[in-house]
Image (spheres, grey):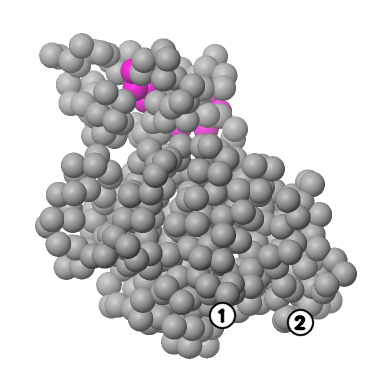
Amino acid sequence: MDIAIYFEPPGMEEPAGDNGLPGKRYADIVDAYTDKRHFPDLTHADIAILGVLDDRHSVNNEGCAMAANLVRKNLYSLFAGNVSLRLADLGNIRQGHSIDDTYFALTNVAATLIGQGVIPLVIGGGQDLSYPMYRAYEQIGQIINIVAVDPMFDLGKDSKVNDSRSYLSSIILHQPNFLFNYTNIGYQSYYVDREAVSLMEKLYFDTYRLGRVRDDMEEVEPVVRNADMLSIDISAVRSADAPGNGNATPNGFSGEELCRIVRYAGLSDKLSAIGFFEYNPVYDRQEQTAMLIAQAIWYFLEGFTQRKDDYPARARDKYVKFHVKIKGQKDEIVFYKSKKSERWWMEVPVETDLMSKYERHYMVPCSLRDYQDACKNHIPDRWWQVYQKMM
């Protein structure tokens, strides 16, 4: 499929280069769609940046369709951490005649990129665009885990409407379903009713309150490492650090914490799509939020260049293997520790005939703490959640 038909050049000045200063910036290494005569060659690309000019289903945040160009402007002025990164900028997906037309375009573009081994990095408009990104995995027949950085669950009240406050319901109810697990990072209790929390528990989804995450950021790493797709609502960042959002609030992650989470995503061998949503230039101050997102993308790109390619299903001889027997539990828990990165995984038992279906899911990223808890006769929550899904 020729995905160029969905795009238009950003309509901004050609990315500024080094301006006579030593060192290469991202403007110097990106293969960008700057005019109608040149669309980037994706044959050897690692990551493709694309904007989406549609905010029609963003709730209380009209204007976030214009996010991508300001983020680009700030990103391209940053020094490239690793100039060997093969980065493409495809421009912006035009707003379709209807929102469904925009969704169709994004699904096809994302599916094509992921199928070619290129990570789509989507900027703007509303977080409802997570739904067509999810549909891209349906198109290539891949069951996935989604991690969302979001102050709420976005379940909505009307299952017939897909917007930035209900896209998760659209994903859950869509058939055929290709969602294995959903994880929320950073929800704030005063925005989430108890029934929604109960529903998440019944679906064996993982949810992490803002305070819990901020108390121990290192425990977020295995959570993000388990994601195929990361969806970020910029309203999850406190307004002091990210004022550019119609739903910005006083509490949330700091800018540094967002960058740390996104770097974890870059380091993950499993992650194959990422989106930054709900940034609205209308509410921004001196492009502060655009600069923050650009810096978060910098951390993602830097993390990507440091990937270890050590997912244990590929070469288990490169791991230290630990067997832990839990009292009263039929199946022992098998842990793997990478000799290369010292990262940990747990193996969840799965029927032989289901191994190919769940090949990306029965090896669960974990931490040293999970292994230590198992040694104390406690079943790690991460292991139990996946075990329940496999039954």
Name the residue type under label 2: Glu
Of 66 and 374, nearer the camera is: 66
| Magenta region includes residue 43 | no
What label does residue 13 carry, if any? 2
SS of the residue under disc 2: loop
What label does residue 301 carry, if any? none
Q: Is residue 53 left or right of residue 153?
A: right
- Name, please, the residue furthest toward the right: 37
Q: Is residue 301 left or right of residue 210?
A: right
Q: Residue 331: x, y in percent? A: 25, 13
Q: CA distance from mark 1 to mark 2?
A: 15 Å
- Stretch of the chain drawn in magenta: 338-349
Residue at (53%, 72%) from the top-left corner?
A: 98
Upstream in sequence: badge 1 or badge 2: 2
Residue at (29%, 77%) from the top-left corner?
A: 249
What label does residue 66 carry, if any? 1
Of 178 and 189, nearer the camera is: 178
Residue at (42%, 30%) from the top-left corner?
A: 361
Quadrant hosting residue 53: bottom right
Name the residue type under label 1: Met
Q: Residues within 10 Å of mark 2 (few under 14, many from 20)?
A: few
Q: Viewer-nearest of labels 1 and 2?
A: 1
Vertical order, 131 against 264 (above or below): below
Vertical order, 224 against 337 (above or below): below
Q: Residue 149: x, y in percent? A: 38, 58
